[in-house]
Image (cartoon, rainbow, N blue to C red):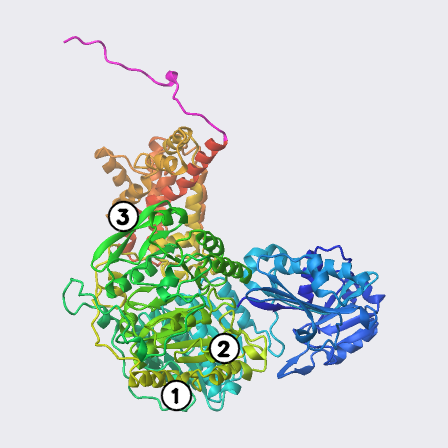
Amino acid sequence: MSAKAISEQTGKEFLYKHICTSAAVQNRFRYASVTAGTDWGRLTQEHPWLLTERLVIKPDQLIKRRGKLGLVGINLDLQGVREWFKAHVMRETTVGKAKGVLKNFLIEPFVPHPQEEEFYVCIYATREGDHVLFHHEGGVEVGDVDAKAQRLLVAVDEKLSEEQVTEKLLPHVPDEKKKVLASFIVGLFNLYEDLYFTYLEINPIVVTKDGVYVLDMAAKIDATADYICKAKWGDVEFPPPFGREAYPEEAYIADLDAKSGASLKLTLLNPCGRIWTMVAGGGASVVYSDTICDLGGVEELANYGEYSGAPSEQQTYDYAKTILSLMTREKHTQGKVLIIGGSIANFTNVAATFKGIVRAIKDYQGPLKEHEVTIFVRRGGPNYQEGLRVMGEVGKTTGIPIHVFGTETHMTAIVGMALGHRPIPNQPPMDAHTANFLLNASNSAVTPATTRTASFSEPKTSSDVNPAKKSKAALPAEAQASSGCSGAKPTTLFRKQTKAIVWGMQTRAVQGMMDFDYVCSRDDPSVAAMVYPFTGDHKQKFYWGHKEILVPVYKNMADAVKKHPEVDVLISFASLRSAFDSTMESMQYPQIHTIAIIAEGIPEAQTRKIIKMADEKGVTIIGPATVGGIKPGCFKIGNTGGMLDNILASKLYRPGSVAYVSRSGGMSNELNNIISRTTDGVYEGVAIGGDRYPGSTFMDHVLRYQDTPGVKMIIVLGEIGGTEEYKICQGIREGRITKPVVCWCIGTCATMFASEVQFGHAGACANQASETAVAKNQALRDAGAYVPKSFDELGDVIKTVYDDLVANGTIVPAQEVPPPTVPMDYSWARELGLIRKPASFMTSICDERGQELIYAGMPITEVFKEEMGLGGVLGLLWFQRRLPRYACQFIEMCLMVTADHGPAVSGAHNTIVCARAGKDLISSLTSGLLTIGDRFGGALDAAAKQFSKAFDSGMLPMEFVNKMKKDGKLIMGIGHRVKSINNPDMRVQILKDFVKQHFPSTQLLDYALDVEKITTSKKPNLILNVDGFIGVAFVDLLRMCGGFTRDEADEFVEIGALNGIFVLGRSMGFIGHYLDQKRLKQGLYRHPWDDISYVLPEHMSM
């Protein structure tokens, strides 16, 4: 959500810190917060004024009208405050319908003043601007300020002046106070704008000769502006509404939500309740709550929540396990039910998200059975059949009763089943599998002839239907669409020739649009170009039916619109941080008439600026926070309508007679399904988005549909919050809307809850009685719209109205024409299990595909939890084993002793020369590594092989030495240029001490040391060097640690694993030399002449 209430303390802190006014604001930062655990001695040390001043104490828990409720202690000394606090703290109190416990209190200095020095001021946001309310009488008895207060609207992007305030708001204020109040109100308004408040009320504000005192304050801020205001806000805590506890599980899900691109919401209503929900989609989650409450389940409804926006398997698992943990803490005499519901997804892979839920169910199968939990599942969308199959299977394997249903079942039917109001079908009918829609049954690659392009109803003469009343401009639809009048918006947004630019590298959405275009028999793709600022101009490959085509991608919008003058639609997948700037830029190009903004979480102040410019430019905005819209047979926005199987099942490839507008993207897809089953199909559908201020409104689209001849009936899926639906009522009464309107506002459950619940959409919250869904449904019913009794009956009402239109001849259903087939993408065919193909690569050491990186089967968190270290990680990645602790330590010691051996050795020398030639780190490192071989550093493998072969064959050390001498071969790992038996290599000594102390057996090492005795007797520098020592000791480790068979140990030696130790260790040294040369600013290296022996051949004559 966007607008969130903050505590009074937080609001005053913001005001005292950031207000800029010439008025003297008194008692700045003089407040103290107290709870049951407060140390009063420490409190008085931090706030010494508590000991000397008269005080006020009040609860700070979002409670309205505290004074009238007797919840304010006034004019007390500290002892009086403590007594008042003791009498109220942890006491259950009823405020309206909400019962809650008083926990948090605020103490402030008491300000003695007469009543006439109290005033009221409030600023709140609306679509058209910010309203400033002022009343010259404030305090407890202020009354109905909406009726009494002076009011001033500050339009979007306009500023407030002291002159305006004085003239419009302060006519009843004494002259001597006007200047102070005007300055304070202007400063307050600027603070309100700068810190992205959406509501700010002070009652009373007291003005004395000393200055301004802010006594009581209530405020909300736009939480989506956190990325803008973080520096000024700091870390803001948003308290729950009074009557609802703040649960750690809610905070956990909120944290998951903040770290995810998906949406994850959870509100606990009654942790002891028996009805739990896990619903996909912001709109669908409200519909399920409505249905539960309609069927009498309000007292037993345990939670409200939703997950949407394609969460990963791990995120869904974390969300599901949180709910399962909560619902299995207390038993219920009747058992419990879990409703895993959802509308038809547009782009979320249902099977993938269900995997996370299935994991959680398996983890909690014991508690679920113990608490007698029954699970009901209903879902649709991409790959939903596989998701339902997996969910059904887990029910069979765990013994938990799980009933699964797909799109053939009405979305909320499972609620009636769960609550015992309707029977549970034994074998519900299943819709065709995704694959059945997408496979080409005709074996023809030829695009079929163009299907129906007009409305699905046969054309009627104008005398057969009531003509739509003309718009104010009195222009036909097409004329309006093409008129160049500034600010005039077209009636027709999309045609079969519509071309769009897609902002953002959303290849999946673009391919979906092209597949839709193809199945609609368009002549060419609807996507003309893409804009992606993070790469240079290039081409992106897509499929057009069977062919591959290239779509240009531009770095900036200017180039895209210049090279594609036919484009008039922009589909913006810009992030919430960049959507505002990119949209404002796009509206500078006159050819752009429609912009769809997909991003959710754009600050409301920015959205209102977008709306203002769009109205000035005559641009239609769809969104923000939307999936888009669809016009069957013509055009679809991004992921709207889901994948091809849903488009074909809902007959969205050709136009019908019914147009709809909703807020929710998921619910718009559900409407596609309902309309396709009850009518001749959709003519056009738009999801305006779930934010408080959508770019276009319900009425904007209803009027377009009214003026579109092909639309015969209109469906509106409204929502709690806002008053837009009342404009539809007015339009029906005034005769501006003459076509049948079927309307239902979701969120009827809100009036049944004791405390305020913020639903999934930012705008889904009623601030007054008229904004409730119940009030709006009744108003629409009274105005003459067709309003069902519940969402459950929406499909029945639609069918009744449609059948009447068919019966009276308004709609004449046309003959159905099959759509062309579209080849299935390889990736999706594989997802559905229709094909298989040998993999190009195989790996058995690492898996990065899940939520957490896995090394040889071990999650990375476990690696750190077990403190395995670098040696342990190397054991997992190289040997696929969890090695003993001593083995991990030995590996790390080997890396340490081989890290470097000075600049003179060949590898370091090469690295240095390369670095001084100006080459980069990778090139220099590679140059050094390429010198590693049998003569330098590569003796580990060779030594291990030679000594192992001799030892395994039973050859005595002397026999081995003699044989190598006879064959004219060097013994690898024996000999050193500098070190000798008299000047031992301390690296070898350190390793030898460790190995002898910790290894269970050192047979090969002992053999090599016996060889060393023989070789050093001949020449003192023929010692077992560090390469040889590591080689033979590693063989002992592999053979004797108990983790490998003899064959496995020998194989690791054979494939070169031991040389990897030297390569990895020495890379550290080479990088050190590279950095050292760069740090010392060493120039190009040239070898001196005097260190080169020039030996040239003597002159030879022919």
Residue, x 28% and y 39% (percent of image)?
A: 958
Residue 1098 coordinates in the image, percent (x, y): 23, 10
Q: Residues within 10 Å of mark 3 (few under 14, many from 20)?
A: few
Residue 881 in magenta stretch: no
**Kind of residue indicated by mark 3:** Ile
Using residue 356 as the reference point, say whether residue 945 is left or right of it: left
- Nearer to us in this view, 709 or 537: 709
Quarter in which the C terminus is drawn? top left
Q: Is residue 27 visible?
A: no
3D distance between C-alphas at marks 1 and 3: 62 Å
What span is colored magenta in the figure?
A: 1080-1102
**Kind of residue indicated by mark 1:** Met
Identify the mark at residue 573; answer none if there is no mark: none
Q: At numbered mark 2, what does the secondary structure look like: helix, strand or loop?
A: helix
- Nearer to us in this view, 479 or 514: 479
Residue carrying label 1: 417
Q: At numbered mark 1, what does the secondary structure look like: helix, strand or loop?
A: helix
Report which quarter residue 755 is drawn in.
Answer: bottom right
Going from N to C along the chain, the mark reached first, 2 or 3, is 2
Residue 518 coordinates in the image, percent (x, y): 24, 62
Q: Magenta stretch: dominant SS? A: loop
Residue 712 coordinates in the image, percent (x, y): 34, 77
Report which quarter residue 179 is drawn in.
Answer: bottom right
Residue, x 20% and y 73% (percent of image)?
A: 817
Residue with the most extreme right position: 52
Residue carrying label 3: 1055
Residue carrying label 2: 730
- Nearer to us in this view, 62 or 479: 479
Residue 1092 in magenta stretch: yes
Using residue 583 as the reference point, say whether residue 125 is left or right of it: right
For marks 1 and 2, give the one nearer the viewer: 2
3D distance between C-alphas at marks 2 and 3: 82 Å
